[in-house]
Image (cartoon, coloured by chain):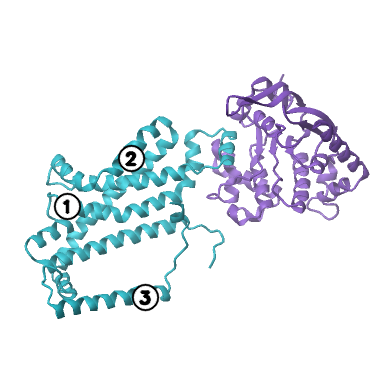
Chain colours: A cyan, B purple
Amino acid sequence: MTTAVEGPRRRLRAGRVWPPVVFGVVALLLWELLVTVSGIPAFLLPAPSAIATQVVASFPTILSTAAVTGGNALVGLVVGFVLGVGLALLAARSRIISELANPLVSAAAAVPIVALAPVFTTMFGSTTELPRRLVVAVVVVVPVFVSTARGLAQVTPVHHDLMTALAATPTQFSRFVRLPGAVPYIMTGLRLAAPASVIAAIVAEYFGGLQNGLGSRITSAAANTAYARAWAFVVASIVLGLAFYLAGLLAERLVTRTPTRREP
Amino acid sequence: MTPDTAAPVELVGLDKTFAASGGGAVHALSGIELRLAPGEFVSLIGPSGCGKSTLLRVVADLEQPSSGTVLVGGKSPRQARLEQDYGIAFQQAGLLEWRTVAENVELPLHVHGVAKAERRARAAELLEMVGLADFAAHRPSQLSGGMQQRVAIARSLATRPKLLLMDEPFGALDEMTRERMQAELLRIADETGAAVLFVTHSIPEAVVLSDRVVVMSPRPGRITDVVKGRRPRGAATTGGRGVDGARPEDAVDDVRESADFFTAVTEVREALRKGSQ
């Protein structure tokens, strides 16, 4: 976890951008060649060109479904994040809450979302986005709580003595020392949770409910043997996941950017 | 006894034992009797484990005494802590990296709900006093170790305490910086009129700073001797600030180079040797 926080600053430089781009293009060309030459059936693996055609053809649908899935992921992410940080703050304040919260979060970590999604869909009805958002929130709470709790525990003895000598209240102690000191850890938790929130939002759609998201479109396209279209929605899911991952990374970089001397 | 005439620190029959792992007990302090006069500078010196830091922490209400009486400005240590009657500095500066230098100095006032404008003004005044006015907007990590320690001292003075508790504040500094900081501290002590309880294990530091050097020995931690220090007083330390002529360092250097100073250093050294036998 600490290596994630202190990880070296990667910078976008031409020398680092080109290799993966070239690799990607070559891989796509090989894929296209393989499919057309060897005649692999479309239900096994559609050609990239066929997928691209479907992306263009279904673009308005892709946008609207991605917005729904992305919205669910975002709402769940925010709720889970607030819950995770809040719970960790309470756990840092009180031993009892800590002892209650730790097994609860461990339990949440052990719950497979595939098990949770159908149950939530039945519990909260299949005509609302609520079950999906709840699934996302449960998935997000865990990494955010764990890394926040770790960050809050990083108080040095001298800061502890200082705040005691200053007769600071527990709330002031959290506000002035614990919470600001934990920020890098909290942001790491957010970066880990962001792409996971998209995965959870998509998987949650596989278990019924509204048919307006990327996940439900993938299942329905595949069920209708429209494999290239299913793949087009898969591509959209990848893009959405990447967008969340990059947003999380950016947020982490912005917040933990310190004005201290850093190697150029 | 009114707070004005009360001794800044008064310890009577102070004992402190820690429960040791394995069921035993460590006798950290035994029969400590010590009284500071207002404005007096007292150093505690002794080998590691003699309880000098524990003594300071008891006064600061960071540790509880096992028995005996502890009065800080005539109050219980807890009351003195809650009312911010003392300022404290540790070996580590303990600055908060997410606050600017000025905001670090303001911290004690911020904790006690002082309005922002007043906090700002007081921080500016204190940073001026420790010669760091130009660094108010910097982050602690941009400062050298000596500068960070000066910020910590400025912070300890924020609430205008009549008592300063310092636990080896210059212990991690190089010798040159250390000597300059000692001169700074003497000037600040003179300007504020605060009494200082100062933990160190440097004999010359204790002698040059103190009115009295309290020599301690370990197992159990107790006071074995009290030696008169050679603190330069009054105009000698403050006179030259900001104008041409004598700088505060000069007055302190004069003391450091005097034969009388070496006599006192020898006296403390012998007291330490005697105590450890």
Q: Amino acid at mark 1?
A: Glu
Q: Chain of mark 3?
A: A
Residue B38 picture location, percent across and down:
76, 29
Position of residue B47 in the picture relative to residue A49 (left or right): right
Residue B159 picture location, percent across and down:
64, 37
Compute the Cα span from label 3 to label 2: 40 Å
How packed mark 2 is, by other alpha carbons closer than 10 Å (few <14, some 14-19, many 20 or more), is some
Q: Amino acid at mark 3?
A: Pro
Compute the Cα span from label 1 to label 3: 35 Å
Tag 3 residue:
A19
Image depth: mark 1 or mark 3 in front: 3
Look at the image and tell me whether residue B143 can be seen.
yes
Figure quadrant of the N terminus of chain B: top right
Chain-order first, disc 2 or disc 1: 2
Tell me the SS state at disc 3.
helix
Res A138 → quadrant: top left
Residue ID at (30%, 39%): A107
**Residue at the farthest left position:** A224
Task: Give the camera-side residue of A35 and A145.
Answer: A35
How packed mark 1 is, by other alpha carbons closer than 10 Å (few <14, some 14-19, many 20 or more), is many
Tell me the SS state at disc 2.
helix
Tag 2 residue:
A105
Tell me the SS state at disc 1.
helix
Tag 1 residue:
A205
User: Do the dots labelled 2 and 1 sit on one chain?
Assistant: yes
Res A145 → quadrant: top left
